[in-house]
Image: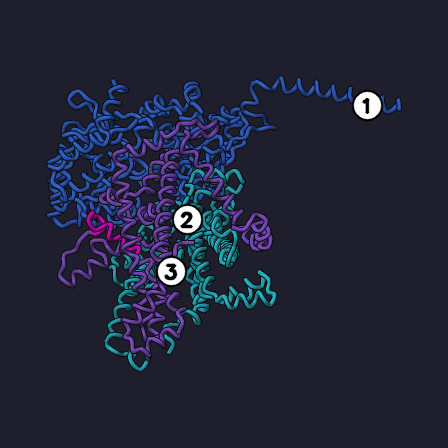
Chain colours: A purple, B cyan, C blue
């Protein structure tokens, strides 16, 4: 370990860099650190004009002891699992398949169109798919061609989570696979030439050249997504909710919104946010450490 | 290599058909909405889910949407927020990513931990609201622009792109006496065009679609963004505000207006402007991303 | 030097004379006029309400007319309409008001006001109302009851009751309609729905917007669901978990099964529901008494012709007969006066003026020359009249319609109002403390899940007992205990 003088002089030589990153840091201090300090509201009873009253863990116990909380947590975890873990391989596969396409014109077309859904906000997407999945909508029309009876998908509790899964995939397939696709593109051409000389088939190339190149972005995205595990997509759930399926897709964020924001219970809402942040942090830390041991790369 | 797999081989054809089916699921619903919005109210009512051609072209839905008193100012505000916002986003993200990817940066670990922490801890609506209020930005477009100035997720992705710039080049440049500023603008950025185009597009779309923060931080109708105005109608069913108090019985056929077609027109107005940047971004992709794949 | 000193003395003397004189002036006018302003110094009152913007058509004239009317009473008020926020009013205004971002004197709330009132940020309106003349006069019974419980919101409008309506041409063509009007039992209602379906008049006899609330307004009392909280076996419980509710849900399930209730009702919203109604795929809907039924009627007649004028149906008769019980624990929306306002009396004076006969004309009829013209002492409504809506008090009370030529409200609208009054029942409910709110939320989610499933036949009606057990475990039992302490 070099001594302190070395540290300061190193920092001094990098001063321009720290200057460059200063605006970003200032942004975070103002718009994140200070609000995080405000999160102490979770331990106080909110009052607009007078001092906040300290109440300790009252709101936390209110949430955790509420019987409905468990089912909301369960919904959140299940939906997150489906969206962040089950859906994940599809992005990688799509990128690989895209790369395999030899018809250049078609590949461009597929790429261009696959980005489109991501431009839409969830309000729009919900509008589109609720109508497509309705009793007389597009999907049932197709099913009727195969003589399958029309089904009201949006109100079926056993299907609704898969609908969320599918719509999330529909929206993000092209978009989220961009990272992987560009990673494939930056593979050294010499690797391909070497494989060809060795007489490797397409599958071999994919397994031994392409996949390894994708490990870094895969790990990065996977770990980062874990940090958001308790989010599960507020915007989407809010727009897809209806009376029949609410109990299955009600997640932490919609719960906060309903009770905390609309109900004016600001401290309660902040308490739940705090819990989410802590859990997300712990998850990322654990997976980062584990991943570094296993694959050599983590988030930093 | 190109000798082995022809583009018209059976596996290629199956692959292509498969991919086309996937994108059909994406484009058909959009075309359906477009067609519905352009059809006359009598026809659009009986629109089935898979129709993609308008019946009886009628612009009445768009006339109604554009007659909203604050549509044009809102459109302008959206464009302003998106352009200025994305610019600030990229400025901060590029500089930060550059700094964090410099080899042997002393404070790298603490900075990374700091940023990851920032990313995971969303303070929530009320704590953030209190800060915006105390700074005095409530009611201004700048509240929305500044509050999401950096997205750490995108920052990390940007870092990955920067890390791909070969060290040999950067080292050579440093030896030649290249300072950080020139390095960033003259070497690292040009070599990461695909990444920059990608992240710019990511930010721009998020900016354009921002609704919730805009709805609580900006109070006045003429200062707010397009999504707020339009969503009031589509979701909250606030026809009164959409059609304007004074217009509600002006058109004779207003009573027969097909609300879902009107919604469709609203949706189109909400997405067309952002789709316009699409070709611009594609231009940057053309060389690096699109033409890529196996080098023929 | 001396000269300067003298000048200073003289100046000081002059100042003190002015100061003394000035003070005396303000002293004398302090008492009466400063409350209601003077011609030279009118008192400023700011007003914030949903969908009311300062430059919308009619509003500037309205403000001027109000100020002039008040001036005639010796009250000089400068009324200013603040611009309504662009986003969702009920999400944005409470937080903006509570954090002090906005501070209007008169503010309309449509939800979110309870925590604000709890913090003491809204003025208690009881003394003002007691010393008023006109506000007291045009108040409805439900307003009086609500204000007694929660004196912070004033809302002089008819109670928000969902009134069932149906097209008169269809209704008159049915055989079962006479029996229904004579004796609106549940069975007669069922017969009517069945006839609508059998004669293929429409696709779905009944439709609603996502929930069964509108249906409840017609059938709750008939099955014995008479209030939100009822006494069951001597204990206070939520009626949602009683046998009466079970019977009602069984009935709805039957309606659904026979194809009498729109199978897509769960995903319908207000606009698709209205669409189905106007285009004729549904026959029976419910709308809020007064304004909404009026709009339904106008639109229906515009779409389907005059023959389709709407007829108002009575609530079903059974254990008792009434539309949905009106919750009077508090008004769900209304005007409040800011506790920090410097001009509370002036603010209330505006509200009082709008309740007076002169104010009623302004509020309900609109602007002279735009929405009505005065010919031969009568108010003749113009074509633009339907575009006007009351910025303050929606009630028709206090409006002298004898000199009005033209339709202030259509017959259907008026019928719905009188029906609402005829079949009025007041609710039993209480405001839960914040500790119990998460429990109630969980209980409500449970109810939504089970009721929607039972109605759609996904679960059988027997699962209702299972629901009651879960309901009690989720908090029903605990809240019952709380009810027992509050309601005696």
**Mark 1: secondary structure:** helix
What chain does badge 3 belong to? A
Marker count (numbered):
3
Q: In the picture, residue A247 is in which quadrant?
A: top left
1 vs 3, front mark? 3
Q: What distance separates the C-alpha of mark 1 from that of mark 2? A: 64 Å
Give the crowd class for mark 2: few <14, some 14-19, many >=20 residues within 10 Å. Answer: many
Image point (54%, 40%), residue name: B136
Task: Decide if residue C422 is in sight here.
Answer: no
Q: Residue beneath label 2, please? A: B211
Q: Residue C27: x and y, percent?
A: 63, 17
Above or below, C228 relative to B184: above
Residue bounds of the magenta highlight = A153-168
Q: Foreground residue, A119 or C271? A: A119
Residue A216: image tag: 3
Q: Is residue A163 magenta?
A: yes
Above or below, C165 relative to B46: above
What chain does badge 1 belong to? C
1 vs 2, front mark? 2
Q: In this view, does C86 lie to the left or right of C316?
A: right
Main secondary-structure element of the magenta-colored stretch: helix
Q: What distance separates the C-alpha of mark 2 from that of mark 3? A: 33 Å
Q: Is residue C156 left or right of residue C248?
A: right
């Amino acid at each position: 370990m070099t001594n302190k003088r070395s540290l300061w002089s190193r920092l001094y030589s990098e001063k321009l860099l720290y200057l460059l990153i200063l605006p970003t840091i200032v942004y975070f201090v103002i718009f994140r650190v200070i609000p995080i300090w405000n999160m102490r509201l979770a331990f106080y009873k909110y009052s607009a004009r007078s001092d906040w009253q300290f109440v300790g863990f009252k709101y936390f116990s209110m949430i955790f002891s509420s019987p409905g909380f468990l089912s909301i947590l369960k919904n959140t975890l299940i939906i997150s699992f489906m969206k962040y873990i089950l859906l994940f391989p599809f992005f990688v596969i799509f990128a690989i398949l895209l790369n395999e396409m030899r018809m250049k014109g078609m590949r461009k077309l597929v790429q261009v169109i696959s980005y489109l859904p991501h431009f839409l906000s969830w309000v729009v997407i919900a509008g589109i798919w609720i109508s497509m999945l309705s009793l007389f909508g597009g999907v049932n029309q197709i099913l009727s061609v195969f003589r399958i009876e029309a089904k009201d998908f949006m109100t079926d509790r056993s299907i609704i989570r898969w609908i969320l899964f599918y719509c999330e995939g529909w929206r993000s397939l092209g978009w989220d696979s961009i990272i992987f696709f560009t990673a494939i593109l930056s593979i050294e051409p010499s690797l391909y030439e070497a494989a060809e000389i060795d007489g490797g088939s397409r599958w071999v190339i994919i397994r031994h050249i392409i996949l390894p190149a994708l490990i870094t972005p895969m790990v990065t995205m996977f770990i980062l997504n874990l940090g958001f595990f308790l989010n599960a997509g507020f915007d989407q759930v809010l727009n897809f909710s209806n009376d029949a399926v609410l109990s299955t897709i009600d997640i932490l964020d919609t719960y906060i919104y309903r009770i905390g924001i609309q109900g004016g219970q600001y401290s309660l809402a902040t308490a739940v946010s705090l819990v989410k942040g802590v859990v997300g942090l712990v998850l990322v830390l654990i997976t980062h450490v584990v991943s570094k041991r296993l694959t050599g790369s983590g988030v930093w | 290599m190109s000798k082995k797999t022809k583009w018209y081989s059976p596996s290629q054809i199956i692959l292509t058909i498969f991919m086309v089916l996937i994108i059909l699921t994406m484009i058909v619903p959009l075309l359906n909405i477009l067609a519905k919005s352009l059809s006359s109210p009598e026809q659009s009512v009986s629109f089935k889910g898979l129709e993609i051609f308008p019946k009886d072209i009628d612009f009445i839905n768009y006339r109604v949407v554009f007659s909203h008193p604050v549509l044009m100012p809102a459109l302008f505000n959206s464009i302003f927020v998106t352009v200025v916002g994305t610019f600030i986003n990229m400025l901060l993200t590029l500089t930060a990513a550059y700094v964090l990817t410099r080899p042997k940066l002393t404070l790298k670990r603490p900075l990374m931990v700091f940023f990851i922490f920032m990313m995971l801890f969303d303070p929530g609506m009320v704590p953030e609201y209190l800060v915006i209020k105390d700074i005095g930005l409530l009611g201004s477009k700048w509240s929305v622009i500044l509050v999401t100035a950096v997205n750490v997720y995108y920052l990390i992705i940007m870092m990955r792109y920067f890390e791909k710039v070969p060290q040999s080049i950067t080292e050579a440049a440093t030896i030649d006496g290249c300072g950080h500023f020139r390095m960033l603008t003259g070497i690292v950025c040009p070599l990461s065009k695909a990444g920059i185009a990608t992240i710019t597009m990511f930010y721009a779309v998020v900016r354009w679609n921002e609704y919730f923060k805009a709805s609580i931080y900006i109070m006045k109708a003429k200062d707010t963004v397009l999504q707020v105005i339009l969503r009031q109608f589509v979701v909250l069913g606030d026809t009164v505000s959409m059609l304007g108090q004074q217009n509600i019985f002006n058109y004779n056929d207003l009573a027969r207006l097909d609300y879902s077609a009107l919604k469709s027109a609203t949706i189109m107005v909400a997405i067309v402007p952002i789709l316009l940047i699409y070709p611009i971004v594609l231009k940057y992709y053309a060389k690096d991303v699109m033409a890529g794949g196996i080098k023929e | 030097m001396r000269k300067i000193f003298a000048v200073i003395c003289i100046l000081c003397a002059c100042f003190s004379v002015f100061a003394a004189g000035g003070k005396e002036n303000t002293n004398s006018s302090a008492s009466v006029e400063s409350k209601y302003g003077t011609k030279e110094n009118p008192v400023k009152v700011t007003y914030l309400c949903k969908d009311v913007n300062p430059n919308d058509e009619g509003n500037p004239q309205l403000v001027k007319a109000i100020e002039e009317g008040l001036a005639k009473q010796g009250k000089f008020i400068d009324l200013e309409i603040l611009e309504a926020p662009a986003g969702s009013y009920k999400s944005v205004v409470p937080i903006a008001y509570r954090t002090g971002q906005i501070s209007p004197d008169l503010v309309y709330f449509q939800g979110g006001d309870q925590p604000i009132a709890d913090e003491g940020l809204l003025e208690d309106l009881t003394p003002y109302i007691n010393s008023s003349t006109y506000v007291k006069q045009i108040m409805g019974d439900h307003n009086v009851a609500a204000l007694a419980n929660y004196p912070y919101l004033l809302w002089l409008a008819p109670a928000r009751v969902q009134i069932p309506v149906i097209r008169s041409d269809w209704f008159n063509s049915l055989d079962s309609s006479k029996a229904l009007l004579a004796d609106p039992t549940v069975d007669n209602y069922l017969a009517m729905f069945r006839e609508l379906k059998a004669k293929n008049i429409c696709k779905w006899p009944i439709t609603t917007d996502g929930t069964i609330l509108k249906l409840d307004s017609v059938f709750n009392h008939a099955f014995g669901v008479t209030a939100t909280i009822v006494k069951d076996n001597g204990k206070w419980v939520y009626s949602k978990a009683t046998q009466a509710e079970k019977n009602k849900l069984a009935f709805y399930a039957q309606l659904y099964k026979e194809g009498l209730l729109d199978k897509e009702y769960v995903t319908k919203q207000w606009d698709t529901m209205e669409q189905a109604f106007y285009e004729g795929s549904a026959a029976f809907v419910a709308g809020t008494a007064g304004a909404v039924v009026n709009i339904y009627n106008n639109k229906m007649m515009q779409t389907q012709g005059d023959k389709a004028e709407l007829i108002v149906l009575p609530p079903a008769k059974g254990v008792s007969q009434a539309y949905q019980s009106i919750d009077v624990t508090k008004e769900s929306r209304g005007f409040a006066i800011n506790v920090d306002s410097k001009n509370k009396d002036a603010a209330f004076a505006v509200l009082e003026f709008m309740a007076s006969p002169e104010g009623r004309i302004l509020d309900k009829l609109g602007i002279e020359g735009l929405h009505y013209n005065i010919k031969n002492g009568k108010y003749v409504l113009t074509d633009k009249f339907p575009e006007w809506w009351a910025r303050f008090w929606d009630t028709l009370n206090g409006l002298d319609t004898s000199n009005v030529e033209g339709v202030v409200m259509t017959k259907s609208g008026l019928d719905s109002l009188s029906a609402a009054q005829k079949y009025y029942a007041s609710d039993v409910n209480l405001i839960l403390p914040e500790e119990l709110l998460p429990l109630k939320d969980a209980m409500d989610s449970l109810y939504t899940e089970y009721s929607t499933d039972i109605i759609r036949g996904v679960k059988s009606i027997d699962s209702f007992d299972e629901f009651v057990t879960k309901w009690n475990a989720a908090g029903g039992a605990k809240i019952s205990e709380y009810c027992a302490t509050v309601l005696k």
